[in-house]
């Protein structure tokens, strides 16, 4: 099995910064794309940022220029640096990974979520 563990959420004032981390562990053969999603109360889960194994990135329009996604393939980890945070960024942030396991099964795995709250 594969587990994703997130850390780094918290409470921050508008204009501040936070860095989220996510580490994947378990029966991992390889990881393709990794990404961060978020879900605010009463809203659907949305993609925030995504990075492929080769380092190609994409961002939601709402976070372009403020958030940066990166990964450490040796550690099976993905990070999200969030700057110039706004109250609209308040949500539970989820890590996601597309994993090929050691028994050659492909799966889409999620972390448990970490709360980010931005006060005005």
Image (cartoon, grey):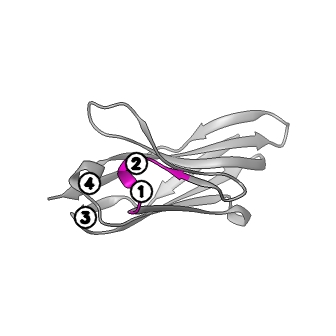
- Residue at screen point 71% across, 54% down: 53
- For disc 4, the marked residue is 117
Q: Nearer the viewer, mark 1 or mark 4?
A: 1
Query: Which range of residues does the magenta coloring cover?
Result: 58-65
Residue 10 in the image, given as x and y percentages of width and height: 31, 60
- Residue at screen point 58% across, 58% down: 78
Place residue 117 in its image quadrant. bottom left
Q: Tell me how many marks there are.
A: 4
- For disc 2, the marked residue is 61
Q: Residue furthest right?
A: 103
Residue 30 in the image, given as x and y percentages of width and height: 78, 49
Q: Mark 2 Cα within 10 Å, few/some/many (few <14, many 20+)?
A: few
Residue 114 at least partly seen: no
- For disc 1, the marked residue is 64
Distance from label 1 to label 2 (Cα)? 5 Å
Q: Mark 1 Cα within 10 Å, few/some/many (few <14, many 20+)?
A: few
Q: Nearer the viewer, mark 4 or mark 2?
A: 2
Q: Nearer the viewer, residue 27 or 120?
A: 120
Residue 42 in the image, given as x and y percentages of width and height: 26, 30
Q: Earlier in the sequence, mark 3 or mark 1?
A: 3
* Direction from residue 27 to residue 4 in the image, left or right: left
Q: Earlier in the sequence, mark 4 or mark 2?
A: 2
Q: Provide the secondary structure element on which disc 1 rests.
A: loop
The quarter of the rendered structure image containing the C terminus is bottom left
Answer whether residue 62 is magenta in the image. yes
Mark drawn on residue 12: 3
Distance from label 4 to label 2 (Cα)? 20 Å
User: Could you tell me if the residues under marks 2 and 3 are in contact, i.e. CB atoms within 8 Å?
Assistant: no
């Amino acid at each position: 099995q594969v587990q994703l563990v997130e850390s780094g959420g918290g409470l921050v004032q508008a204009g501040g910064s936070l860095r989220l981390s996510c580490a994947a562990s378990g029966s991992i053969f390889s990881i393709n794309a990794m990404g961060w999603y978020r879900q605010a109360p009463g809203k659907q889960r949305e993609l925030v940022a995504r990075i492929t194994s080769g380092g190609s990135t994409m961002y939601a329009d709402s976070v372009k220029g403020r958030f940066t996604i990166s990964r450490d393939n040796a550690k099976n980890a993905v990070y999200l640096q969030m700057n110039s945070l706004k109250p609209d960024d308040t949500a539970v942030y989820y890590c996601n990974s597309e994993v090929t396991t050691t028994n050659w099964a492909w799966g889409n795995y999620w972390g448990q979520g970490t709360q980010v709250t931005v006060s005005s």
